[in-house]
Amino acid sequence: MSSSVVEEEEEIQCGSTLFEQEELQEMSGVNVGGGYVEVMCGCTSHRYGDAVARLRVFPNGDLEITCECTPGCDEGLSFFCSLYISLFPACFAFLAKWVLIYVHVTCEYKLTPAAFEKHSGRETARKWKNNVWVIVGGEKVPLSKTVLLKYYNEASKKLNRSNKSQGTKVFHRDEFVGCIECGKERRFRLRSRDECRLHHNAMADPNWKCSDFPYDKMTCEAEEERGSRKVYKGCTRSPTCKGCTSCVCFGCELCRFSDCSCQTCVDFTSNVKA
């Protein structure tokens, strides 16, 4: 038997041992293989309805979502433009009665649950554990009430224990991202892994604009924070700190991502494994 076949069988076996069969038997769209468990998931917007996707759960705690809300939605990231130059949440603009121009944009990474929540047009974002659901016994059940977050929660606890054992508390100050169209800077909080990922993705997007702001509905017309307010970035040592070892992080498991292909994350992941 070739080594590639053996490795593939080991990966499938790994995926099959993530959860007990009884824990997944009533879930819709379950697929086991490749060192992960995949299920059908979705997120509901009161305006646009249900966005359907595939959620993959990995043993290291990573959660990866591939959007299937429309046939043209590739890797969960497709964008539409209307002749009226109106912005709509991705993949749902086709519902409007306007003539649309389809613009396809490919991306090297899949969606995180938080990014999928925003992508679906969900009005109350930043609560993906409750807003993203799976079908269990024919009913929509929030991820927070299923076993699917077991490894995600374990990874978060492990990270917290690691930081405590080292006598350090990982802290990231607020950062700003500038809009390519109006030049205004918008504040990003970096207190959780999800928030760090949203900021990371925004920084990696050379065409980031105010309408891409993940927390609230934002346009270029919205006022920018005053300069006197911007100096307060949340440093625990000094409110108006310009950057110190207490609030500036040069790489940790909270703000670097194994599923991201940018050089910064690749280098960090390689060094951790070394």
Image (tube, rainbow, N blue to C red):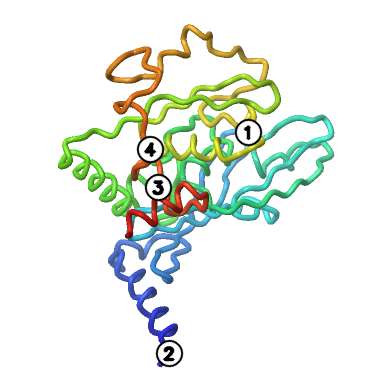
The residue type indicated by label 3 comes to: Val
Residue at 41 percent of width and 39 percent of height: 194
Q: Quadrant of residue 237?
A: top left
Q: Nearer the viewer, residue 169 or 49?
A: 169
| Of the two numbered discs 1 and 3 in the rendering, the one whose residue sits closer to the viewer | 1
The residue type indicated by label 2 comes to: Ser
Q: Quadrant of residue 93?
A: top right
| Of the two numbered discs 1 and 4 in the rendering, the one whose residue sits closer to the viewer | 4
Task: Read off the residue under disc 4.
Answer: 250
Choose the circle earlier in sequence order: 2 or 4. 2
Q: Nearer the viewer, residue 256 or 195?
A: 256
Which label sits on residue 208? 1
Looking at the rendering, in which quadrant would you find the C terminus?
A: bottom left
SS category of the residue bearing label 1:
loop
Residue 71: x, y in percent? 68, 56
Which label sits on residue 2? 2
Residue 23: x, y in percent? 30, 61
